Image: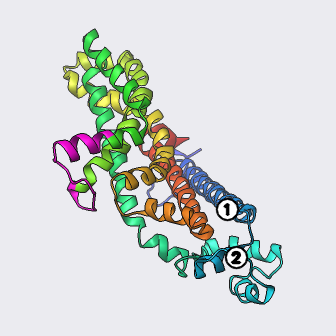
Amino acid sequence: MTTAAEAADPAVPIPALSRAPSARSGVRAVRWGLVKLALAILVLVAAASVTFFAQLLVPGDRATTILNQQTGRAQLWSAADLAPVNHQFGFDRPLAVQYVDYVSGLFRGDLGTSYTQHKPVTEVIGAQIVPSLVLTVAALVTAWVLSLVVILVTVKRRRFVTAIGSTWEALTASLPPYWIGVVLLVVFAVELRVFPVIGGTGVAGTVLPVLTLALPLAGFLGQVTRDEFEKVLDQPFITTARTRGMSDTGVRLKHALRHSVLPAVTLSGWALGSLLSGAVIAENVFGRPGIGQVLVVAVNTRDVPTVSGIVLVVAGVYVIANLLVDLAYVLIDSRLRAS
């Protein structure tokens, strides 16, 4: 215990009891970060392993496939013809060595060489990844805005208004993106001519592809948020806020919304990777550049390294998205920072 004299004398150090919880919190934060990093690495290694062995399951000899693509002829080749190709791509090495090189190359940024473009896969994907990421992020933001507007306007309102909101969410969540894209293209590009038929990277060419991906996701986000939002509006602290004179809009924005978005935040981690995968549909429907076009060409030409590289990129986006979700949890709910 600290005596009265020690408390009166500023030169006498007082035990820093208050520092202990913060020190423990710091250790927990470091441990949490290391665990998340280790899990992220394991996920990427697992994805790389699956893509590596999937390449081996593709019918036909890999060297023969490459030579057929280079010559434009489908034929059988002699061992002497195949030897340079096997050596160039390392197919003549033991399978275990090929696997280790492939997985370790992931951490060096080496995803192999494209069979058809004869360039590193990282260059092939890197040249088209930016439009796809712009489309993905824009679709996620748009979906959040649409879902929150519908929630704020319709939850706990008149029965008719609430029914409209619930119906809208159920309808949009059930619509397939490909069908939405075709309808938007026909109505707004072909018939009304508001937007270009063949989309580009500009604002006008991005609106319809973004809506194609955002509308179904907005329905899902709205459905998982609506129930939580209704429950929060019935909590005692909401009643207290209203009795203090806060407006209904202020209560919904400042208190109810913050406590009801955690399920939707969780869904957003999955949605970010899913949207990047779904960009393949939007980019092909609207003729946009991006990894969707690259993936379709790679599949049609059996360019296995490029297909595998895109799979790994999508897996990496899933990993990063889940890390961002965990950080968002801590920022939204202050109780998690103290746990």
Element type where label 1 sits in the image: helix
Quadrant of image for the C terminus: top right
Distance between the Cα atoms at labels 2 and 1? 27 Å
316 sits to left or right of 230: right
Is residue 45 rendered magenta in the image? no
**Which residue does the image show at 38% across and 29% down from the upper left?**
222
**Which residue does the image show at 43% across and 50% down from the upper left?**
281
**Which residue does the image show at 43% across and 32% down from the upper left?**
220
Disc 2: which residue: 75
250 sits to left or right of 98: left
Q: Which mark is residue 51?
A: 1
Q: Is residue 268 positioned above or below 50 on the image?
A: above
Residue type, label 2 = Gln
The residue range painted magenta reads 183-204
- Mark 1 or mark 2, which is nearer the start of the sequence? 1
Looking at the picture, how far across and down is residue 247, in whole percent?
19, 22
Residue type, label 1 = Thr
